[in-house]
Amino acid sequence: MFSWLRSDDRRRKDPEVFQTVSDGLKKLYRTKLLPLEEHYRFHEFHSPALEDADFDNKPMVLLVGQYSTGKTTFIRYLLEQDFPGMRIGPEPTTDSFISVMQGEVEGIIPGNALVVDPKKPFRKLNAFGNAFLNRFVCAQLPNPVLESISVIDTPGILSGEKQRISRGYDFAAVLEWFAERVDRIILLFDAHKLDISDEFSEVIKALKNHEDKMRVVLNKADQIETQQLMRVYGALMWSLGKIVNTPEVIRVYIGSFWSHPLLIPDNRKLFEAEEQDLFRDIQSLPRNAALRKLNDLIKRARLAKVHAYIISSLKKEMPSMFGKDNKKKELVNNLAEIYAQIEREHQISPGDFPNLKRMQDQLQAQDFSKFQPLKSKLLEVVDDMLAHDIAQLMVLVRQEETQRPAQIVKGGAFEGTLHGPFGHGYGEGAGEGIDDAEWVVARDKPMYDEIFYTLSPVDGKITGANAKKEMVRSKLPNSVLGKIWKLADIDKDGMLDDEEFALANHLIKVKLEGHELPNELPAHLVPPSKRKATE
């Protein structure tokens, strides 16, 4: 019956199971995990079945935030282009889920058409009904950024009185569906209007188990002074700490993500550095997409196993004839004890179990007599997948990464700061003097020469030991000073002449001012007398 159940010997004889990571994921899911999910009705409780499009689609970025935090403007900033269906304003304007994707022709595809397109990863959203589908569209347009990623804009989360407005569909459940399938979740907050509403708190809690995908953007940070910004940042971290129950701190990026002049430019350098860090994170998504899908499959398999144990335990406790209703109520009320028993018997981490309250609510509408007893072979197949096949796919992931050219997001705002004088850090730190005709170190060389000639140079050079006596005065760690020595000792003779010594002191100054050292010495820092030798 189960053609995939073979001995370890067969596995060793047949190692070429997967040609690509994507094909391997599809095959594992269809043949090993899906039978377990269907047998124990996993899709009725947790998440619809995966389709090929879920494994083939480009990386997706999900934007979540209260209204007027700048979600739509953030997408416009990344693309450097308006997109169909875009509306921006101070009140709730985006009342739909908008999937912004690459397309040859600009236009909008309505939700009901999207969920029947087998090439789009949205078919299972059909389960949320017309109330949702009427508020779901795909905005297609040709844009270089969208060649590598897709972006999901979401309705602004309501606050205060506005929370009482009913959406007509389960907003948190839809977000949870997207969270399972996207590569990055960006929570946006407004720096001058920080307020985490009840609905936003519920949404963040619904994203539980996806904290590894979460990033936070504290947007519109140019609208407040530095001291107030520090207070807002602290308040945000405190609020998030109460909602997101993880020991790790979620990465928060501070900035102003639109193309208008900064209102308060005091923190311009901070905003530039934060933007570059966020852009690097987003740019890495295509390179890490296969690994993310593999990780999500593992998480899904662990949940499916726990679900099977829960359903089979409930089935086992049900009477065959009388008192079924009373027993069902008793089992639902005692679900926490069943969780604890399964945890002990099967050595399962508490974090792998579904939310207790939600599971109890879902079980109320179920007929326990239709549940299936424990079928060990199905679980053994999934265990085998986790123990062997996943490891094989991990090797394939690394092979694909090395064989393919660097995959990063290009175009739009990602190109604006890559080259030229407006690149982050251009003309600063080790980049200072890059466009000057004179050697930048020459400005302070007379001061460095005075120190150099007190260190007993022989034939115009000082030894490493003598150089060390002076360099350690900077109080920089030996690892940093060692790197500076390697950069400054251009002719690699283990000694420093006056120009190399001046260069070493210049690099010390760069580091003490808070800048990073280059891995290789930039051409403009090479002393003029040594430039021909290094060419």
Image: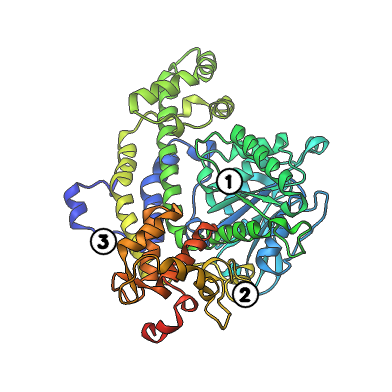
Horizontal arrangement in the rendering, residue 16 relative to residue 219 (left or right)? left
- Measure the C-alpha gap from mark 2 to mark 3: 50 Å
**Nearer to the camera, 126 or 146:** 146
**Nearer to the camera, 124 or 155:** 155
| Label 3: how many Cα within 10 Å (few below 14, some 14–19, many 20+) | few
Residue type beneath disc 2:
Pro
Could you tell which of marks 2 and 3 lies nearer the N-terminus? 3
Q: CB of mark 2 within 8 Å of CB of mark 3?
A: no
Residue 177 tag number: 1
Instruction: Tell me where residue 497 appears, x and y as whole percent.
Output: 37, 74
Whether residue 23 is visible to the viewer of this picture, yes or no, is yes
Instruction: Tell me where residue 372 appears, x and y as whole percent.
Output: 41, 30
Measured along the vertical axis of the image, is residue 280 above or below residue 459? above
Q: Which residue is mark 2?
A: 421
Q: Residue at x 53, y 20 (%)?
A: 332
Q: Residue at x 44, y 43 (%)?
A: 299
| Label 2: how many Cα within 10 Å (few below 14, some 14–19, many 20+) | few
**Closer mark to the observer between disc 2 and disc 3:** 2
Residue 366 tag number: none
Q: Which residue is mark 3?
A: 16
- Measure the C-alpha gap from mark 3 to mark 1: 33 Å
Instruction: Tell me where residue 20 appears, x and y as whole percent.
Output: 36, 63
Q: Residue at x 54, y 13 (%)?
A: 326
- Measure the C-alpha gap from mark 2 to mark 1: 43 Å
Measured along the vertical axis of the image, is residue 461 above or below residue 53? below
Question: Label 3's element?
Answer: loop
Measured along the vertical axis of the image, is residue 410 above or below residue 513? below
Residue type beneath disc 1:
Trp
| Label 1: how many Cα within 10 Å (few below 14, some 14–19, many 20+) | some
